[in-house]
């Protein structure tokens, strides 16, 4: 991207709607309630051939620095300082307010380019608000409708004029386009049963989930070494699922902070429903999910439901017992947590559980190593030859049960996919195989191929009978 743009303005003027319009996706939560956005959210914007990085921010309000609104304002000011250009959005429908005047003065003091945007200009009676915007002294306002996509061409021209054509349209490097092309290697002679090596250089997507006030945002801030996400003693501060990128030992980690997930019966408000839905999307998009527990009150019913949800989605899961710095008798508590993990989460046998402190940074390296190790297992592939030798041994040790006097025979096994590992077994009478025998096979795979903690899927397929449906000769 050639430059960075921050969208700023007072609450409920349509900043997140404009952000979604520019990135072409409904990434940011949008609601009529003022103050929906709290953290700053980056995105890749495209506008009539113009590409740049866009940052959605919280509505600017005058508030005490220690209050929630004050901390939101600090996040927005950090976005303004980071950006090359600010889109100052005002509401042409409702007109200017004293807050708009104060924000205009603050942007002038920054000394960076500003494009004044008059949103909701399609509304009846918006002309007066549009002309009032001239009084801010930031030049000619650009009338748009973020909701309906009107005025986007004028907005593009205003951005180019403010940032300069050299920054807006950097010269294309033809040589780079040629050298960046990946030429696939020949696949001749490749062995389909070969177990591929784990690629520890590719970026890794990690989602941080848990109950409200478990310390998810504080944990990510400690990883980054800066106050990137809004934190505080209030429960439910995070609403949007915010992604941040950083490097850990040379590997790119894309981490998603999510809203706290309460019990479904308690989620009544529309805005909280949107936040939880956004968190669920982050889980589906991630590869590894870290479920953050409050070590002072672990294994609440909601904690167990979140773990079960992550495993049913097929994600690799790691448990993080946060606020470990508040625990006094650590050895006794750690032994109790291990016992409860094995007893309450039998579907995640062998799941990695790491005590950490997001406040002090204790245990974070061990947590990241557990994430990498779990992802390695989640991507694991086993050769067909090994699987069939293993399947024969399992049947000798514990044969499948006989149903109606007829023995079920498992003939052939292969791995059909990874992420998570999934296997297909060809057998007779697959519909009669009991669930207990499937669990026996899954536990055997975990133990014999060192695959703890990740979900394992086994699908059974009956071979077609060529004589089925034909009449018997007499």
Image: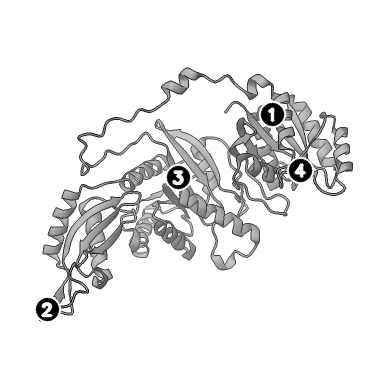
**Is residue 442 rendered to the left or right of residue 317?**
left
Quadrant position of residue 197: top left
Label 1 residue SS: strand
**Residue under the image location 84 percent in, 36 percent down:** 101
Which label number is shown at residue 10? 4
Instruction: Rate crowding at label 3 as few (under 14), some (14 to 19) or many (20 or more) other CA atoms within 10 Å.
Output: many
Label 4 residue SS: loop
Q: Are marks 1 and 3 in contact (CB under 8 Å)?
A: no
Q: Is residue 325 visible?
A: no
Indicate which label's residue lies in the foreground, 2 or 1: 2
Indicate which label's residue lies in the foreground, 1 or 3: 1
Which label number is shown at residue 359? none
Front residue of this view, candidates 252 and 191: 191
* Residue ranking furthest to the bottom: 474
Indicate which label's residue lies in the foreground, 2 or 3: 2
Whole-number angstrom distance, CA of label 2 to CA of label 4:
85 Å
Whole-number angstrom distance, CA of label 2 to CA of label 1:
85 Å
Q: Are marks 2 and 3 in contact (CB under 8 Å)?
A: no
Quadrant position of residue 2: top right
Looking at the image, residue 68 lies above or below residue 337: above
For the C terminus, give its image quadrant. Answer: bottom left
């Amino acid at each position: 991207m050639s430059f960075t743009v921050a969208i700023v303005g007072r609450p409920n003027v349509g900043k997140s709607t404009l952000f979604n319009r520019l990135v072409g996706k409904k990434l940011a939560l949008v609601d009529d309630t003022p103050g929906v956005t709290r953290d700053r959210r980056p995105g890749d914007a495209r506008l009539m051939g113009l590409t740049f990085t866009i940052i959605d921010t919280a509505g600017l309000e005058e508030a005490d620095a220690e209050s929630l609104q004050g901390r939101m304002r600090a996040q927005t000011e950090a976005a303004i300082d980071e950006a090359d250009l600010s889109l100052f959005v005002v509401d042409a429908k409702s007109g200017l307010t004293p807050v708009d005047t104060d924000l205009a003065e603050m942007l002038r003091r920054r000394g960076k380019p500003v494009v004044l945007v008059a949103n909701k200009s399609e509304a009846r009676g918006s002309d007066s608000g549009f002309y009032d915007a001239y009084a801010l002294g930031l030049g000619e306002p650009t009338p748009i409708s973020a909701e309906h996509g009107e005025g986007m061409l004028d907005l593009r021209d205003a951005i180019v004029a403010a940032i300069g054509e050299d920054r807006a349209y950097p010269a294309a490097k033809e040589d780079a386009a040629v050298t960046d092309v990946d030429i696939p290697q020949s696949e001749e002679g490749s062995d389909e049963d070969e177990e591929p090596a784990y690629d520890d250089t590719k970026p890794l997507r990690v989602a941080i989930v848990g109950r409200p006030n478990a310390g998810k945002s504080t944990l990510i801030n400690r990883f980054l070494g800066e106050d990137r996400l809004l934190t505080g003693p209030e429960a439910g501060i995070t609403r949007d699922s915010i992604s941040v990128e950083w490097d850990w030992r040379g590997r790119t980690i894309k981490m998603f902070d999510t809203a706290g997930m309460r019990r479904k019966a308690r989620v009544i408000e529309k805005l909280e429903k949107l936040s939880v839905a956004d968190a669920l999307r982050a889980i589906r998009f991630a590869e590894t999910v870290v479920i953050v527990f409050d070590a002072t009150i672990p294994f609440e019913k909601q904690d167990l439901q979140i773990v079960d949800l992550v495993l049913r989605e097929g994600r690799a899961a790691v448990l993080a017992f946060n606020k470990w710095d508040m625990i006094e008798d650590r050895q006794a508590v750690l032994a109790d947590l291990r016992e409860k993990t094995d007893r309450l989460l039998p579907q995640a046998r062998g799941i990695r559980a790491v005590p950490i402190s997001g406040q002090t940074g204790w245990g974070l390296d061990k947590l990241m190593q557990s994430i990498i190790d779990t992802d390695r297992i989640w991507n694991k592939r086993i050769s067909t030859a090994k699987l069939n030798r293993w399947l024969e041994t399992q049947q000798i040790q514990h044969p499948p049960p006989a149903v109606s006097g007829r023995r079920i025979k498992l003939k052939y096994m292969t791995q059909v996919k990874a992420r998570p590992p999934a296997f297909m077994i060809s057998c007779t009478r697959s519909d009669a195989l009991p669930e207990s025998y499937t669990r026996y096979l899954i536990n055997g795979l975990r133990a014999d191929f060192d695959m703890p903690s990740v979900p394992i899927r086994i699908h059974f397929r009956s071979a077609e009978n060529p004589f089925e449906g034909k009449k018997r000769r007499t």
